[in-house]
Image (cartoon, rainbow, N blue to C red):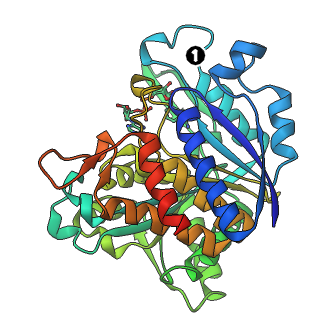
Amino acid sequence: MNKKIAILAGDGIGPEVMTQAIRVLDAIATKFGHKFEYTESLVGGAAYDKHQNHLPQETIDVCNNSDAVLFGSVGGPVDKQHEAKWANCEAKSILALRKAFNFNINLRKMALYTEIASLSPLKPELLSNGLDIVIFRELLGDVYFGEHTQTEKNGERYAFDSGSYTESQIKSIAEYAFKVAKTRSKRLISVDKANVMAMSKLWRQVVSEVAKDNSDIEYSDMLVDNCAMQIIKNPSQFDVILTSNLFGDILSDELSVLSGSVGMMPSASFSSSGLALYEPAGGSAPDIAGKNIANPIAQILSASLMLGYSFNMLDEAKIIDEAVKATIVAGYRTGDIYTKGANEKMVGTKEFTDQVIAFISK
Ligand code: NAD
């Protein structure tokens, strides 16, 4: 199979972890006889240096002409956010890209490997079976796109936010989430606040209608306050979580800390046009950039999601996931997931990937 991939490595650790993800994709191409054609394009601070624009039109054109987008991360050091190169860099590049392509569905995948369970803030007995959770977050509705005012009313400060959902916005993500649930353990929990909010009442109605067309999926609803507790008390009950924009923002960050490092969580954004963008859930980590110490797992697993979801290369995606797991089981660790004294080998970004590739190429 021939596929065109837009490569937007960005800033900080983006380029170095992207280099490793491409090496992994090349190993898959060799093993399975595929041809991946990469077009590298600038975004974020790197694009600003050349174009004085964080998301130049030529980068959008490259994405438009590709079968999928593999994104690294953007942004500069926290103490340099006042510089034009870094000011609102994330909003002007990745958020602008999401808007340009109308990405309405976000997926984050959280895997906890039992070998590094001691790094998780949860007690080991809660994690004995590992965790493998996918959370779907709607991206274009809710309070993020409503009215926000702060003013004075009756002699005191007053704030007002509004939010909305349409039936079709909810149906679109619900159908996608049920489709993915069929490829996993066939369990889906939809999270809302239907005891209070009108948006959530509609959310629950529409999701339950979609559920009727997917009766092979074990489906239930959960209130968001309970879900936030259950993720801590009994995380292994979750397989696919489906939720709205605001709740998804909060719950996906809660989930991301369970795996032990921010460098482990891949994500994907889908649009109804069919184009999808794949990226690590973390940021550009300027504090460790250029030192060959960043964890490449989130970027490598983002490439795996791309193969599975955009190219339907399910065996290829599975081999990448298994190779990452096998590398951890064999004791290889980047610094962020290394425990001194344990029977582990601390390795660099490239050397960790060498092991992943060795497992793939076996
Ligand atoms: P961050 O996620 O970049 O880093 C937080 C901490 O996690 C740092 O100590 C970092 O070293 C560590 N870390 C992150 N990824 C790692 C990896 N792969 N391996 C090992 N350690 C890793 O968050 P931050 O420091 O708050 O933000 C830094 C920059 O990233 C900011 O400019 C911010 O705007 C940007 N950012 C970009 C995105 C994106 O591109 N989608 C997302 C979040 C933050």
Task: Left or right? Give the position of 250 relative to 204.
Answer: left
List x then y, in percent, for residue 136: 55, 61
Q: Quadrant of the N terminus?
A: bottom right
The residue at 65%/41% (across/down) is 145
Which amino acid does the dot numbered 1 rest on? Trp
Residue furthest to the top: 83
For the residue pair 340 and 171, the one nearer the viewer reads as 340
Task: Left or right? Give the position of 273 relative to 351.
Answer: right
List x then y, in percent, for residue 121: 21, 52
Residue 170 shows up from this direction: no
List x then y, in percent, for residue 186: 51, 84
For the residue pair 264 and 92, the one nearer the viewer reads as 264
The residue at 60%/82% (across/down) is 211
The residue at 52%/20% (across/down) is 76
Quadrant containing ligand 1 reads top left
- Could you tell me which secondary element the residue under label 1 belongs to? loop
Residue furthest to the bottom: 216
Q: Is mark 1 within 8 Å of ligand 1?
A: yes
Residue furthest to the left: 341
List x then y, in percent, for residue 272: 78, 59
Mark 1 surroundings: few (<14), some (14-19) or many (≥20) residues within 10 A: many
The residue at 60%/49% (across/down) is 23
Q: Quadrant of residue 221?
A: bottom left
From what the image shows, is residue 61 above or below residue 202? above
Task: Left or right? Give the position of 173 relative to 251.
Answer: right
Q: Which residue is mark 1?
A: 86
Q: Quadrant of residue 313?
A: bottom right
Task: Left or right? Give the position of 149 relative to 154.
Answer: right
Q: Quadrant of residue 128?
A: bottom left
